[in-house]
Image (tube, rainbow, N blue to C red):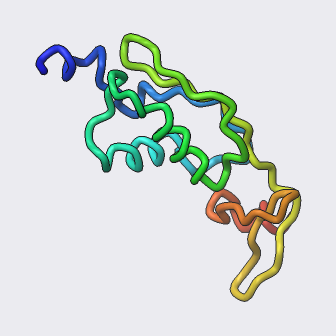
């Protein structure tokens, strides 16, 4: 128990590495959101058999993530994820403002766009 809870097995948000987010993702911290989501089930340990599946599922729930190519664990305490991100292609006018969407019509987080950017 003492060995399995040592720092080289436990994963924190800094030990989650994701593909470099594109420049249009400015206000969303995908790593922290995924860490908080997966952590609800308890501490993250690279010794957990289903950790990569849980992290991958959480990544797919992120609106900016279009596809998860791979999630892998490494020793000491690291998770690496290879991602494909959604790209905004237009803004759709809705009551109260505009919403960014990707080529498939997926709504993206509007908070990542300043009003000036959204107007462009």
Residue furthest left as drawn: 2
Q: Quadrant of the image for the C terminus?
A: bottom right
Q: Residue drawn at (12%, 18%), measured in percent from left and top?
A: 2
Q: Position of residue 116 (x, y in %)?
A: 77, 64
Q: Residue furthest front?
A: 49
Residue 56: x, y in percent?
Answer: 55, 39
Q: How many numbered dots are placed on residues in this image?
A: 0
Residue drawn where x is 71% and y is 42% of the image: 67
| Image height of 6 relative to 70, above or below | above
Residue 33 x, y percent position in the rendering: 46, 48
Q: Is residue 105 left or right of residue 4?
A: right
Q: Choose top left, top right, bottom left or bottom right for residue 18.
A: top right
Q: Position of residue 114 (x, y in %)?
A: 69, 62
Of the 4 image quadrants, the one containing the N terminus is: top left
Q: Residue furthest bottom?
A: 95
Q: Residue at x 64, y 55 (%)?
A: 63
- Please indicate whether residue 4 sits to the left or right of residue 109 in the image: left
Would residue 40 be found to the left or right of residue 112 on screen? Answer: left
Horizontal relation, residue 20 to residue 56: left or right: right
Q: Which of 85 and 115 lies nearest the eye of the viewer? A: 85
Residue nearest the observer in this picture, 104 or 88: 104
Relative to the observer, which residue lies in front, 118 or 7?
A: 7
Instruction: Tell me which corner region of the image, top left, top right, bottom left or bottom right, holds residue 76.
Output: top left
What residue appears at the point 73 percent right and 43 percent down from the top-left corner? 85
């Amino acid at each position: 128990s003492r060995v399995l809870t040592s720092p080289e097995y436990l994963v924190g948000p800094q030990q989650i590495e994701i593909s470099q987010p594109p420049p249009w993702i400015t206000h969303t911290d995908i790593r922290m959101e995924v860490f908080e989501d997966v952590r609800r089930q308890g501490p993250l340990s690279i010794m957990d058999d289903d950790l990569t599946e849980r992290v991958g599922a959480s990544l797919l729930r992120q609106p900016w993530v279009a596809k998860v190519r791979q999630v892998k664990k490494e020793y000491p305490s690291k998770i690496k994820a290879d991602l494909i991100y959604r790209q905004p292609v237009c803004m759709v006018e809705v009551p109260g403002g505009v919403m960014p969407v990707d080529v498939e019509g997926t709504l993206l987080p509007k908070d990542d766009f300043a009003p000036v950017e959204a107007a462009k």
